[in-house]
Every structure is written in structure tokens, then in C-alpha cells.
Image: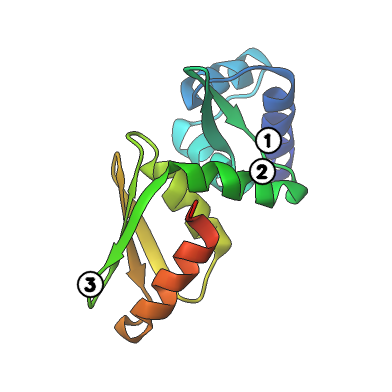
């Protein structure tokens, strides 16, 4: 099965089922007759912009619509606790377990100010394309993520 068809199936499964993690999604894909490697599924989720959100203590994977950018910004912004920088990088502190989602969302924005992100459990390291842009990068992140 090609990539486009596989990603359509992933969207369909997420719309029709309450899926809490990639392991469950992988099992649902297999149940539908589609053999997918975990690494491939992970790449597909990143490309589709799939987020994992928590509501009332229950996690759920969501595939955002193109119009949902404002909603996602609000959800991601709630997860951000602080944004700090020094002369060479920006650090975003998040709620526990939410750094990956924040980093992934930032990566999807494809800002020319960001070379890349590295996410831990509650910390995202944002690496600028140039240290000369630290101030602009910090402002960009505040504008796109901060709940303040």
C-alpha cells in the first residue's frame, strides 16, 4: 500500500476510533489488514500533524483539520510554562510529558528561524538557524505558543 493510501487510512481510523497511543493505532492498522512498521507509523503521524491530547485524564490522538490551526495553537499554548533563551538557543518548559507535542508542532510550522528542535519530557530545546536571530526566534515562539 502506498504512503498516501496509508495516511488516509490513519486519518480514517482516528476519526472513527478513540485511539490513545501509537501502539493502539498500529494494532488497529494491523486489524484492518495493513502491515506497518512502528518507524513508518511514527513518520506518518509527524507528517499528518497528529497530536496527542489529554482530556479528563484520558489521552487521545487527533488528526487536525487544515482549519484547526487556531485550536491546536490554543491547546499547545496551554502546555507551555515558560520560554527562555541565552546567546545560542531557546528553551521551552512544558507540562510534564508534553514537550514532544510542542516541539513537533513547532517543527511543522517550518519557520526559517528554526534549524530544529529536541524534546525531552518537559523541555524543548529550540536551535536557531543563526544565533543572530535569538531575539526574533524568541518573539516568534511567544507569538505562536505562549498562552500569555
> Measured from the top left, where is residue 118 in percent x and y?
32, 54
* 20 up-or-down from 148: above or below: above
Q: Residue at x 45, y 48 (%)?
A: 102
Asked which quadrant contains residue 19, the reply is top right
Q: As drawn, which residue projects farthest toward the front?
A: 148
* 51 up-or-down from 82: above or below: above
* Residue indicated by mark 1: 6
The answer to whether residue 132 is left or right of residue 35 is left
Q: Which mark is residue 86?
A: 3
Q: CA distance from mark 3 to mark 2?
A: 41 Å
* Residue indicated by mark 2: 3
> Measured from the top left, where is residue 93 in percent x and y?
31, 49
Is residue 142 visible in the rendered structure shown here? Answer: yes
In this rendering, the label closer to the viewer, 3 or 2: 3
How was the colour assigned to the protein in this rendering? rainbow
Q: CA distance from mark 3 to mark 1?
A: 42 Å
> Measured from the top left, where is residue 40 in percent x and y?
51, 39
Callout 3 crowding tier (Cα within 10 Å): few <14, some 14–19, many ≥20? few
Front residue of 114 and 23? 114
Q: Residue at x 46, y 43 (%)?
A: 101
The answer to whether residue 80 is left or right of residue 33 is left
Q: Regarding mark 1 in the picture, which secondary structure is present there?
A: helix
Q: As drawn, which residue projects farthest toward the top?
A: 31
Question: Which of the two labelled residues, at mark 3 and mark 2, occupies the earlier sequence position?
Answer: 2
The answer to whether residue 12 is left or right of residue 37 is right
* 14 up-or-down from 122: above or below: above
* 142 up-or-down from 130: above or below: above
Q: Regarding mark 3 in the picture, which secondary structure is present there?
A: loop
Amino acid at each position: 500500500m502506498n504512503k498516501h493510501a496509508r495516511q488516509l487510512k490513519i486519518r480514517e481510523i482516528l476519526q472513527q476510533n478513540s485511539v490513545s497511543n501509537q501502539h493502539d493505532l498500529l494494532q488497529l492498522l494491523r486489524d484492518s489488514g495493513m502491515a506497518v512498521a512502528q518507524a513508518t507509523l511514527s513518520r506518518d503521524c509527524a507528517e499528518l500533524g497528529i497530536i496527542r491530547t489529554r482530556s479528563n485524564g484520558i489521552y487521545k490522538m487527533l488528526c487536525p483539520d487544515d482549519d484547526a490551526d487556531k485550536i491546536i495553537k490554543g491547546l499547545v499554548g496551554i502546555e507551555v510554562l515558560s520560554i527562555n533563551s541565552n546567546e545560542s538557543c531557546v528553551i521551552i518548559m512544558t507540562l510534564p510529558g508534553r514537550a514532544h507535542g510542542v516541539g513537533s508542532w513547532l517543527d511543522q510550522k517550518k519557520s526559517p528561524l528554526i534549524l530544529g528542535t529536541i524534546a525531552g519530557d518537559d523541555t524543548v530545546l529550540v536551535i536557531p538557524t543563526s544565533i543572530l536571530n535569538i531575539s526574533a526566534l524568541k518573539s516568534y515562539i511567544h507569538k505562536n505558543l505562549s498562552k500569555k
